[in-house]
C-alpha cells in the first residue's frame, strides 16, 4: 500500500467488489441481534456499545480497502476480525438466554465453542498480524519469520488449552454448560491467565516494534502511512495493557478497551485514505460524515439516557425523548461541521482552495 504498490492491481480500473460490503452488512445485522439479546438478558447495553463501534470500524475500513484492492491482506484481516467477533458476541448471548430460560441441549456445545474461540481466532490474529504486515501484507524481512511461527504456535496452544482445560463453556455471563472435551489432567494444570495477561501485551508490543523497524527503513508516502499507524497502535497498546489486568468488566474498562481496539482500524484507515489511495475520496468523505453523525447521536443517548438516567434514578422514556429532540435540533449544524471536517480530512488543503 505504498505509493508504488497502490497503483498496482485493480483499484480504479475495475468495479469495486461486493463481497466485502456484504460481509460488513452481515456484521451490522449480527451486532444488532446481539444488542437485542443483551437487552433480553438484562445486561448493560452501555458496556457493549464501545466494542460494537470499534469492531464496526474494523469492518468498515476493511470493506473500503478490500472492495477496491482485490486480495488486500490488511482489508481481509479487518473484515475477518469484525465478522468473527460478531459471531462470538451472538453466541455468548444465545447461551446466556437459553440457560436462563431452562434450555440445556446438545446444540449449545458448538455455540459455546464459537463464543469461547471467537476472541482467540478473531481478535488476536489481527492484533498480532496487522502491525506485522502493514502496509504491503508482507513481513518486514525474513528475520521476522520465527516470530510469525511463534504467533501461530501460541494461538494453537491456547486453543488446545481452552478446548481441553475448560470444565464449562460460558456465555456472556457466569452461566455455562459442561465441556464434553474436558480433560481433568489439563484442567488441573496451573492457571495460565496471569501469564497470558503479560504475554499478550508483550506480543502486541513486539508486532508494533516491527512496524517501527519498517518505518525507519521506509520513505515517501509509505513512511507517512506507517507513522499514522505506529502512533495509533502505540496508544492502543496502553489501553490494552490497562484492560488486560482488570478482573471485572465495567463501563470505564469497556470505554478504555473499546477505544484501544478502535485505534487499530482508525489509524489504518486514516493512513491509507489520507493519501488518496484506491480512488476512495468521495466514498470516504460520505462515510466519515455519516459515521460521525451516528457516533454523535449515540454519545447524546448514552450521556442523557444512560448517564443522567442512572444519576437521577428515573425511567428513560422522558430522557429518550429529550435526547431525540436534542439530536433533531442540532442535526443540521452538526452535519455541516462534520462535512467540513470530512472534506478537510480527505482532501486536505484542496478542501478550502480559496
Image (tube, rainbow, N blue to C red):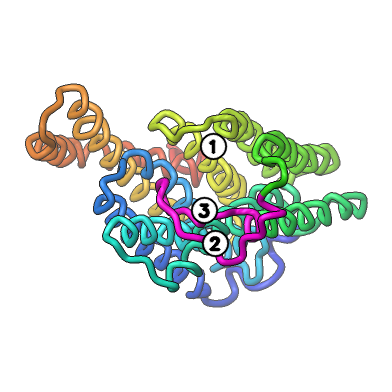
Where residue 214 sits in the image (x, y, percent)?
Answer: 81, 43
Where residue 285 sits in the image (x, y, percent)?
Answer: 42, 51
Kindly indicate whether the residue at mark 1 contacts the one at mark 2 (C-beta within 8 angstroms): no
Q: Residues within 10 Å of mark 1 (few under 14, many from 20)?
A: many
Q: Residues within 10 Å of mark 3 (few under 14, many from 20)?
A: many
Q: In this view of the protein, can residue 305 be seen by the observer?
A: yes
Which segment did they paint magenta? 162-187
Q: Measure the alpha-carbon separation of dots 2 and 1.
A: 32 Å
Which numbered disc, 3 or 1, marks the residue that appears first in the sequence?
A: 3
Q: Secondary structure at mark 3?
A: helix
Q: Nearer the viewer, residue 124 or 100?
A: 100
Kindly indicate whether the residue at mark 3 contacts the one at mark 2 (C-beta within 8 angstroms): no
Asked whether residue 23 is drawn in magenta, I would say no
Q: Measure the alpha-carbon separation of dots 3 and 1.
A: 12 Å
Which numbered disc, 2 or 1, marks the residue that appears first in the sequence?
A: 2
| Mark toward the viewer: 2 or 3 | 2
Is residue 233 found left or right of 157 in the rendered image?
A: left
Answer above or below: position of 2 versus 262: below
Q: Nearer the viewer, residue 274 or 190?
A: 190
Q: Nearer the viewer, residue 161 or 104?
A: 104
Is residue 201 found left or right of 95 in the rendered image?
A: right
User: Which quadrant of the figure contains the C terminus?
Assistant: top left
**Can you identify the residue that label 3 sits on?**
58
**Can you identify the residue that label 2 sits on?**
179
Where residue 256 sits in the image (x, y, percent)?
Answer: 48, 32
Amino acid at each position: 500500500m505504498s505509493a508504488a504498490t497502490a497503483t498496482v492491481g485493480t483499484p480504479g480500473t475495475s468495479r469495486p467488489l461486493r463481497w466485502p460490503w456484504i460481509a460488513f452488512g452481515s456484521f451490522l445485522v449480527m451486532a444488532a441481534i446481539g444488542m437485542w439479546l443483551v437487552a433480553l438478558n438484562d445486561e448493560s447495553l452501555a458496556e457493549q456499545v464501545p466494542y460494537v463501534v470499534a469492531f464496526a470500524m474494523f469492518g468498515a475500513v476493511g470493506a473500503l480497502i478490500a472492495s477496491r484492492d482485490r486480495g488486500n491482506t490488511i482489508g481481509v484481516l479487518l473484515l475477518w476480525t469484525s465478522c468473527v467477533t460478531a459471531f462470538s458476541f451472538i453466541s455468548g448471548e444465545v447461551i446466556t438466554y437459553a440457560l436462563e430460560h431452562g434450555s440445556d441441549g446438545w446444540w449449545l456445545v458448538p455455540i459455546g465453542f464459537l463464543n469461547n474461540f471467537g476472541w482467540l481466532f478473531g481478535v488476536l490474529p489481527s492484533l498480532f498480524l496487522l502491525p506485522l504486515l502493514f502496509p504491503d501484507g508482507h513481513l518486514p524481512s525474513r528475520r521476522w519469520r520465527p516470530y510469525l511461527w511463534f504467533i501461530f504456535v501460541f494461538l494453537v496452544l491456547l486453543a488446545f488449552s481452552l478446548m481441553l482445560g475448560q470444565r464449562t463453556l460460558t456465555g456472556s455471563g457466569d452461566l455455562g454448560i459442561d465441556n464434553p472435551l474436558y480433560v481433568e489432567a489439563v484442567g488441573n494444570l496451573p492457571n495460565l491467565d496471569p501469564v497470558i495477561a503479560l504475554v499478550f501485551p508483550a506480543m502486541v508490543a513486539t508486532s508494533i516494534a516491527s512496524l517501527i523497524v519498517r518505518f525507519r527503513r521506509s520513505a515517501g508516502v509509505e513512511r507517512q502511512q506507517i507513522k499514522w499507524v505506529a502512533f495509533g497502535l502505540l496508544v492502543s497498546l496502553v489501553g490494552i495493557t490497562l484492560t488486560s489486568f482488570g478482573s471485572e468488566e465495567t463501563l470505564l474498562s469497556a470505554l478504555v478497551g473499546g477505544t484501544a481496539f478502535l485505534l487499530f482500524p482508525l489509524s489504518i484507515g486514516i493512513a491509507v485514505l489520507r493519501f488518496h489511495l484506491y480512488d476512495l475520496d468521495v466514498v470516504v468523505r460520505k462515510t466519515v460524515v455519516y459515521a460521525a453523525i451516528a457516533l454523535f447521536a449515540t454519545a447524546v443517548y448514552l450521556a442523557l439516557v444512560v448517564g443522567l438516567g442512572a444519576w437521577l434514578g428515573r425511567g428513560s422514556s422522558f430522557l429518550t425523548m429529550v435526547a431525540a429532540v436534542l439530536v433533531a435540533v442540532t442535526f443540521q449544524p452538526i452535519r455541516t461541521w462534520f462535512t467540513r471536517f470530512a472534506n478537510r480530512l480527505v482532501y486536505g488543503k484542496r478542501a478550502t482552495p480559496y
